[in-house]
Amino acid sequence: MKRHVAWLCALACAAGAAPSRGQAQTADTLFATGVRAYKNLEFDLAASLLRRDLARRNVAAVPVAERARGLAYLGAAEWFRGRRDSAVVVFRRLVMLDPRYRPDRLIFPPEVTSAFDAVRLQTKTALIVLPGDTAVVLGTTLYRFWIVVSSFQQIDVSLRYEDGAPFRPLYVGPVGDSLDMSWDGLDAAGGPPAVSRMVLRVLSRAPTGELASIVQVPLAVTLVPADTLPWPPGPAASDLLPERADGAAAKRALLGGLLVSSAVLVLPAVVGESDTPSEPRVAVAGTIGLATALGFILHRPGRPLPDNVRANQAQRDAWQQRIASVTAENARRRRDVRLTVRGGEPTTIQPRGP
Amino acid sequence: MKRGLGVLVAALAASSISAQTIRPVANAAVVTARVRSELPAGTEELSGTALRGTGAVAFGRFHLLASYLQGSVQPDGGAGQSRDLAEGTVLLGAVPFKWLTLETGPYARAYSTPGATTQRWVFWELRARAAGAFIGSAVHGYAELWRALTADVNVPEPFDHAEGGEAGMIVRLARSPLEGRLAYRIDHVVLGGGSRTETVDGVIIGIGVAWR
């Protein structure tokens, strides 16, 4: 008895170890079995299996194309069961799911495709096809997207805040099949968006003007300002020449003049002659002394050095030019603000039941 | 000693090859000359003016200089005969440092008195001159000393020694080859163990051109 219990437990564990795989296989099996039953003209069985399959697929993250195929077979099965109303409901669900879907005319007979087309023409809904993550330059480049409608209808395309308040209207008017749309990244006032989340909403209206469906996609927008250039550094103190004379030149003039004057005065003594008259020497030494005094005044400490002032001013002017060019470049970059747009999952709202 | 001199000359020659630019210099000057001759018999003093012309060609750190001075000097007080004074030098120079110039060469002087024998003095000199700008780059000061290595003099007294020098300033106009010179010079020759001395001194006022 204990051995039987242990065997059953092990079997239960093994069965529970791969539930998702088992579920997937079940779903595939249901769909395939349902399609096979449809092809065998067992429409009741097909409808039952396909409904169960769609019920499972709705909860799972299944691609739209597979769900559309299931709905098409289910609608056809309902049609051939004579349950036209159910078929119309299924076809409307199919149109709402994917307005671009068209049943394969090699698989489905004309009465089914005609019924589907009739439902499609009466169902007013839209599909928003967004690009992947996109960056646009505000006011310069455009964020482009595509709106596909199920049939001719009036649509109202707008951007809205998350709370539903209008952000910017984009289009109001008729659409026959599809419409290329674009947004320049600006709000209704021509400024950059002040929020990071908004909603792209498409209202579909019936010919009577009644609201038929609402499709909206959340958009996450991020302003990315361009990097600005740093201010160029000003001329370093070590690069600038002194604009006022220090005392070195004046000291050199004084000492040099003193030395040369002294050399003139003592020259006879140096060569061994002491009886020469001093007038010529004093005259020369005195002239050199006058030149020395003049040189000292010309090179006095603190006097302006025009050449250095000009050279420094040239450096400062060049720096100011660099500042001006960086300012202009930064202004251009500030205008070149980029907006990244990331679209979310679309949702469809039907104000009225079928 | 000779080897060291050879090394110095070789070094200077090598550095001058890298700066092979010939730079001519020429200047003319008015020289106030005063001659004082002290002899056992008495002292004779003469003074006057002379003109001196100088030309030089520099090549790298070397230069060749020639100068000629001519004038006449009269006895102070008016008694006695005047003499014609002529001097000439040819010097080969080198610049081992920017501020120092060494020169050597013959220096000849002649006194000629009408009706008397012309005195000729020929010295082989060695000169050293230190120079540098002291008022901006426009005014240069210099001091020069020379000494005779050998001499040939046609006077009775035997040659003893001779020395001299020059000091002054040169004003160079900015961006112009013109220059002006104001200096004082003196030559002092001793003969016969001091029994005779000959001294020539004076002021030099000149202008010149120097292509730098």
Image (spheres, rainbow, N blue to C red):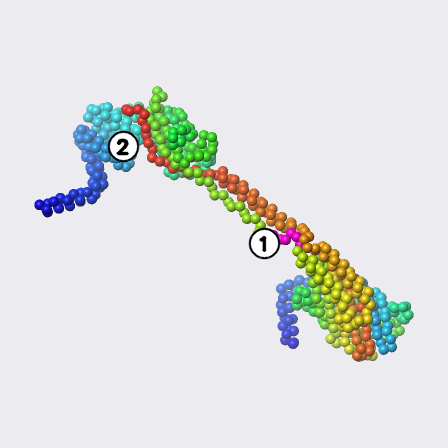
Residue A68 got which mark? 2
Q: Position of residue A287 (x, y in %)?
A: 78, 60
Q: Disc 1 marks which amino acid?
A: Ser
Residue A238 got which mark? 1
Q: Is residue A288 magenta?
A: no
What secondary structure characterizes most of the magenta part?
loop
| Mark 1 residue element | helix
Query: In which quadrant of the rendered image does the N terminus of chain A lie?
Result: top left
Query: In which quadrant of the rendered image does the C terminus of chain A lie?
Result: top left
Quadrant housing residue A10:
top left
User: Depth-wise, is mark 2 or mark 1 nearer the camera?
Assistant: 1
Crowding near pointer 1: few (<14 within 10 Å), some, many (20+)?
Answer: few
Labels 2 and 1: the sequence-earlier one = 2
| Residue pictured at 37% horizontal, 36% vertical | A343
Q: Position of residue A147 (x, y in %)?
A: 37, 30
Q: In the picture shown, does residue B101 fall above or below A219? A: below
| Residue pictured at 72% horizontal, 64% vertical | A259
| Residue pictured at 38% horizontal, 39% vertical | A133
Residues in magenta?
Answer: A237-245
Whether residue B54 appears in this view of the structure is: no
Whether residue A257 appears in this view of the structure is: yes
| Proximity of marks 2 and 1: CB atoms separated by less than 8 Å | no
Q: In the picture shown, does residue B15 fall above or below A26? A: below
Q: Position of residue B63 (x, y in %)?
A: 70, 66
Quadrant housing residue B177:
bottom right
Q: Chain of mark 2?
A: A
